[in-house]
Amino acid sequence: MINNKFLSLLGFAHKSRNLVTGEDTCRMNIKKDAIKLLFIAGDASDNTKDRFLHLCKSRNIPVRIIEDRDTLSSAIGKVNRTVFGVTDQKICRGDAQSFGCVDDT
């Protein structure tokens, strides 16, 4: 179960334009080395999970598989999104425990 603090942080990241959503947008930003942390919905297809896990592993980007797409999408006011990328390391550092980030500075 996802706590409300995590969902609030996800919404804050989206509102501050530090969150990208959708498979194509996230893939493009991963290749630009813009994404610092990636979330994948637990009910995403196995092909999607494998593709992003491999891509992130090769670029040393942490990945978290979280609950389901409806819960994550509703936190940012969108519908049916399975992949979310945080683009700002400072947001991860803001509350490392809630976001599941490690402060590496």
Image (cartoon, rainbow, N blue to C red):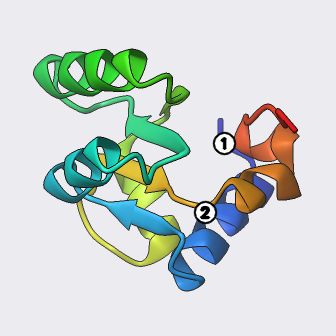
The structure residue drawn at horizontal position 55% and vertical position 45%, both measured from the top left corner, is 36
Query: Residue at position x 31%, y 54% from top?
Result: 29
Residue 67 at x, y = what percent? 48, 35
Residue 10's tag is 2
Horizontal placement of 86 versus 103: left or right?
left
Q: Which residue is mark 1?
A: 2
Q: Which residue is nearer to you in this view: 104 or 42?
A: 104
The image shows residue 98 at horizontal and vertical percentages of: 80, 45
Residue 48 image position (x, y, % from top left): 17, 28
**Whether residue 4 can be seen here:** no
Image quadrant where one finds the C terminus: top right
Q: Decide: few, some or many residues near mark 2? Use Cα within 10 Å; few <14, some 14-19, many ≥20.
A: many
Classify residue 16 as left or right of residue 58.
Answer: right
Give the amino acid type for the residue marked by disc 2 in the picture: Leu
Camera-nearest residue between 73 and 28: 28
Q: Quadrant of the N terminus?
A: top right
Badge 1, how many Cα within 10 Å: few under 14, some, many 20+? Answer: few
> At 48% from the left edge and 66% from the top edge, which residue is drawn?
19
Considering the numbered disc 1 on the image, is that residue within a helix, a strand or a loop?
Answer: loop
Q: Name the mark nearer the viewer: 2 or 1.
A: 2
* Residue name at image x 24 percent, y 32 percent: 44
How far apart marks 2 and 1 lie (CA) works out to 11 Å
Element at label 2? helix
- First in sequence, mark 2 or 1: give its number: 1
Q: Is residue 23 visible?
A: yes
| Image position of 104 with respect to 57: above or below | below
Kind of residue at disc 1: Ile
In-image side of 5 versus 86 (left or right) = right
Q: Which mark is residue 41?
A: none
